[in-house]
Image (cartoon, rainbow, N blue to C red):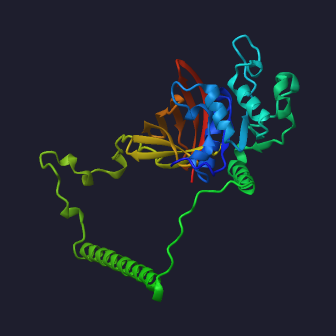
Amino acid sequence: MLNNPQRKKIFISYRVNDTAADTGRLVDSLKQVFYEDQIFMDIEKLEPGVDFRVALAKSLETCDVLFAVIGPEWVGVDKNGNPRIKHPEDWVRIELETALKRDIRVIPVLVRDASLPQPEELPESLYPLLNRQTYEISNKRWKYDTDQLINFLKQIGFKPKKQDIPLPEQSGGIGKWLIYGLIGLALVVIAALMFEATRSTKAQEKNITDHPVTRDSIKPVNNDKPNSNIMDKDPETVKEENLPALPANVGGAWYDAANQYTMYITQSGNTLELKSVTVAGITTGEGVGTVDGNKINFKVQLYNVGVISGSATVPEDNNVLNGKFIITNNGASYTEPFYWTRQ
């Protein structure tokens, strides 16, 4: 998609260690409505070797709105325990200072129950940020909140992408009657299949009536071992074989509790294939797993995050998975619970 200078543009400012996932989700929502060249996500669009300050200045020259995505750790902490936002070279600070100096509309977008920092946590150059009206996006009502934010952008002149326009109905109503004809044909095929299934069932019932199975009609499989004929045994002495437990059915779409992603599971016997997809339909990871009875184990490679190992016990209704993740990234690992539901 070529850049169109007439389109209004949005600059997304955020701190990676604070709100990378939330910001990515917000950008996914925006891209469903607006063109990609309208959204600048700081370092995401910088080419190797480009001077950051120069590229930032050029981007903000054509920017109409800046979203400052703020989470609980937005101020940041350096290795000495000092606020990163107070460093003159902190790139989040540079982005906001540049936007405020150029009188660009800056909107603090609060996520994960965050609030604006206290004045003593900020450099004096960012004090004007505290006077800007904030906008909160909650995980529990993410779609509603982002829809309201998108509606606000439309109100201030942001034009959405053109939607596909349905073809007009052909003269004489040919298209309509073609659809009716296809529906009628489908009903005829279904009726024929039901009739054939009923006839087959009646034929089987007649065959059983004409040729009843009796004790005398069953011959032992091995005449040398008459005891092998199960019909000669007392039913009370026949023991069931210890068959392995059938694997639980976990195939389908599983939704996480925060509605941030959907885990699609394809099951073939005891083997699983998993795919993580955002609410915007973007694949964020893939993996494999197994089911042993009602126990599920899997590993998924999440792009830009690392490997997650998961395990859970499947309840009888097969519609809830309540387990734990072990997330490994850059040699470190930590554990957190997960709760999925299937609809």
Query: Would you say 93 lies left or right of 184 here?
Result: right
The residue shown at (38%, 76%) is 190
Residue 10 in sight here = yes
Residue 332 placement (x, y as % from top left): 56, 19
**Quadrant location of residue 256?**
top right
**Quadrant location of residue 64?**
top right
Residue 324 placement (x, y as % from top left): 58, 32
The residue shown at (74%, 26%) is 93
**Quadrant location of residue 196?**
bottom left
Residue lying furthest bottom? 172
Residue 153 placement (x, y as % from top left): 72, 52
The residue shown at (49%, 80%) is 169
**Image height check: is 141 above or below 78?**
below
**Image height check: is 258 above or below 166?**
above
Q: On the rendered image, what quadrant is the C terminus found in?
A: bottom right
Residue lying furthest left? 224
Residue 255 in sight here = no
